[in-house]
């Protein structure tokens, strides 16, 4: 980009500030993490991050997070749609309720969900006789992650949807598009970047979540242990290096996932 | 030397603040469930200190998971004393040079003024007839315990079961089989002691909960008596509550004497009585006898008896790739 075309000055100073701020807040803590990992030899590192228990925990954390983020993307879009497009009594209250998972201490969420879904809970008591168990197994993990990730998709899609001109849809209909075509060809492409952002945020949040999940997961090795629990477990045995090793791998996978989503967004933008 | 008045004032205020702190402040960094005990103890100690020395003292408390607290102290939290529920946490501080290497010798009873042991809680009336550790391995019995990876409570439960098998003459291999049979009956591994209590009592999961004696009795108070029965197995483990002075802090704050007096107070009849009232077993015979109804006699073994030391048990059983991992690898 040519500097002459910029209206507002201050590129250098703002970039410098951005880099400084990011370094202080993100890069320095993360490099401390990597540095601590470096105290391990390569075979030690490899053993720490590929132990069967740890592998099972990666599978659960990333699998459950992906499922939860996907559910949130679909349901969040629906919620945003209802909140933007329709007027109904109590809309403001419902709108505010969407943010509650942000504000609630995660442990409270975990305990509340467990109380509902356990075999003697309000909901669990009806499900358990049918053989559906939602607490103390991986199902519980997914439910907790859906709960904490809900606001991300709604809040990223909402403003874009509000800006979307109704005339576009009307024009599409006038030009003979079916309802499905209007949705899939006109509305969805406009929403996709916001939807992907929301998905990525919900995913990132779910991967790092600890507080709510441990209450509902059951925490059985090989079955329902999430990766953050493995890290806490390693800290309990004063295995700092092992804990940071697992954290580093987690961070790498998360980073790759987020990069992929960004790339997807860029590709989508170019296409439209 | 000329000092600007404002600077002088600031310097004076700062040094005064330092003096006040040196005179009156102690920070006791402790484990999670000891909050109420130390609240009572600190009040008694403050009165006791005023009476014996004529000086005021204030004891602040900090509570969280035992090893999280130890890490915080190692990283610089200015604790004058640490009062933990596992010796490995203080060993870790000794290793970091924050606590005297010989901390076990600084106070009586291996620097553990009080201890607890592992008991069972069963549903009211004991419908499954659970009496001893053997019953926990019976098919169809569901056992709630804490994950040894994340809580001292869980480590003690595991070691108690192992020690029970050994006390019956089992070899290490047989003990391993016994313990892994027990853990096959575990539907949920709780994160910590309170979490386990919640799972057993509020979620209604399991036939038996294995937890600290100090928790068992407080459950009655919190959830109302008559919901559960406490069962004393034939044999159980001594779970020490070790204490130590944090040399790094007391040197800096010049509070060694106060810290010493505080920990000594834990051994006094008054301190032991307060511990007993919070269901923590005292060493003092007279106090123990007075609370005989709560502290039923039980054959206790120490960690050292079967495992050498807790640090050793940690390495063999709970570290990655250890015996506990093997149990769950087999499932």
Image (cartoon, coloured by chain):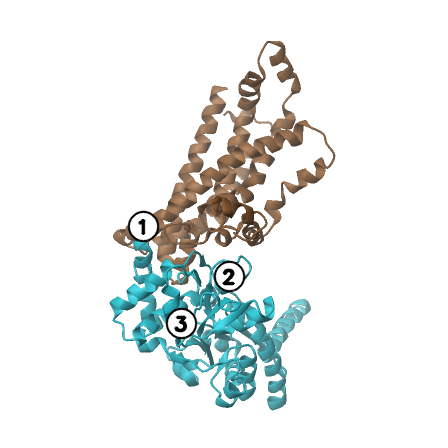
**In this view, which residue lies farthest toward the top?**
A175
- Report the disc number at residue B132: 3
The answer for how far apart the CA atoms under marks 1 and 2 are is 29 Å
A166, above or below B327, in the image: above
Residue farthest toward the right in the current orientation of the protein: A89
Secondary structure beneath dot 2 equals helix
Q: Which residue appears at 36% of the width and 69% of the height?
A: B134
Return the x and y of residue B70 as percentages of the image width and height. 45, 67
Note the chain letter of the cyan one.
B
Question: Seen in the image, is B3 located left or right of residue A236?
Answer: right
For residue B200, the mark is: 2
Q: Is residue B300 above or below residue A24?
A: below
Disc 2 crowd rating (10 Å Cα; few below 14, some 14-19, many 20+) is: many
Asked if badge 1 and badge 3 are on a common chain, one would say no
Callout 1 crowding tier (Cα within 10 Å): few <14, some 14–19, many ≥20 = some
Q: Nearer the viewer, mark 1 or mark 2?
A: 2
The residue under the point 30% across, 75% down is B168
User: Which hue is chain A drawn in?
Assistant: brown
Q: Which residue is mark 1?
A: A52
| Chain under disc 3 | B
């Amino acid at each position: 980009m040519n500097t002459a075309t910029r209206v507002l000055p201050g590129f250098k100073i703002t970039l410098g500030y951005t880099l400084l701020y990011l370094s202080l807040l993100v890069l320095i803590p993360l490099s401390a993490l990597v540095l601590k990992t470096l105290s391990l030899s390569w075979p030690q590192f490899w053993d720490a991050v590929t132990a069967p228990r740890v592998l099972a925990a990666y599978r659960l954390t990333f699998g459950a997070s992906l499922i939860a983020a996907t559910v949130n993307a679909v349901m969040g879009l629906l919620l945003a749609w209802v909140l933007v497009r329709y007027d109904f009594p109590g809309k403001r209250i419902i709108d505010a309720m969407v943010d509650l998972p942000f504000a609630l201490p995660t442990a409270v969420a975990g305990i509340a969900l467990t109380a509902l879904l356990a075999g003697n809970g309000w909901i669990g008591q009806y499900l358990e006789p049918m053989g559906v168990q939602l607490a103390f197994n991986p199902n519980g993990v997914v439910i907790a992650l859906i709960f904490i990730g809900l606001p991300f998709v709604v809040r990223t899609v909402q403003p874009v949807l509000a800006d979307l001109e109704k005339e576009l849809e009307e024009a599409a209909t006038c030009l003979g598009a079916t309802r499905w075509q209007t949705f899939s060809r006109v509305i969805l492409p406009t929403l996709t970047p916001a939807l992907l952002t929301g998905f990525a945020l919900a995913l990132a949040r779910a991967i790092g979540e600890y507080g709510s999940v441990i209450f509902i997961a059951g925490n059985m090795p090989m079955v329902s242990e999430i990766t953050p629990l493995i890290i806490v477990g390693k800290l309990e045995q004063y295995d700092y290096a092992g804990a940071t090793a697992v954290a580093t791998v987690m961070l790498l996978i998360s980073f790759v996932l987020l990069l992929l989503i960004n790339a997807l967004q860029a590709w989508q933008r170019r296409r439209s | 030397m000329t000092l600007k008045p404002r600077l002088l004032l600031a310097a004076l205020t700062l040094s005064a603040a330092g003096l006040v702190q040196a005179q009156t402040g102690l920070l006791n960094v402790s484990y999670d469930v000891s909050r109420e005990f130390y609240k009572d103890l600190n009040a008694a100690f403050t009165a006791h200190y005023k009476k014996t020395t004529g000086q005021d003292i204030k004891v602040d408390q900090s509570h969280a998971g035992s090893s999280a607290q130890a890490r915080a102290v190692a990283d610089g939290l200015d604790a004058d004393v640490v009062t933990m529920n596992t010796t490995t946490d203080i060993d870790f501080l000794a290793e970091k040079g924050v606590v005297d290497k010989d901390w076990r010798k600084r106070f009586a009873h291996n620097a553990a003024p009080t201890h607890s042991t592992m008991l069972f809680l069963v549903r009211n009336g004991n419908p499954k007839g659970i009496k001893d550790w053997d019953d926990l391995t019976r098919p169809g019995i569901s056992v709630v315990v804490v994950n040894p990876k994340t809580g001292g409570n869980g480590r003690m439960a595991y070691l108690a079961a192992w020690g029970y098998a050994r006390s019956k003459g089992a070899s290490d291999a047989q003990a391993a089989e016994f313990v892994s049979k027990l853990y096959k009956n575990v539907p949920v591994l709780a994160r910590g002691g309170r979490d386990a209590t919640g799972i057993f009592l509020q979620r209604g999961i399991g036939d038996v909960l294995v937890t600290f004696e100090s928790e068992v009795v407080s459950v009655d108070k919190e959830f109302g008596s008559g919901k559960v029965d406490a069962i004393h197995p034939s044999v159980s483990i001594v779970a020490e509550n070790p204490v130590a002075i944090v040399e790094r802090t007391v040197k800096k704050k010049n509070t060694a004497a106060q810290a010493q007096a505080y920990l000594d107070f834990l051994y006094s009849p008054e301190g032991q009585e307060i511990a007993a009232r919070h269901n923590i077993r005292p060493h003092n015979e007279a106090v123990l006898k007075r609370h005989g109804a709560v502290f039923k006699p039980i054959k206790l073994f120490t960690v050292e008896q079967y495992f050498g030391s807790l640090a050793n048990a940690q390495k063999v059983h709970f570290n990655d790739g250890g015996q506990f991992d093997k149990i769950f690898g087999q499932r």
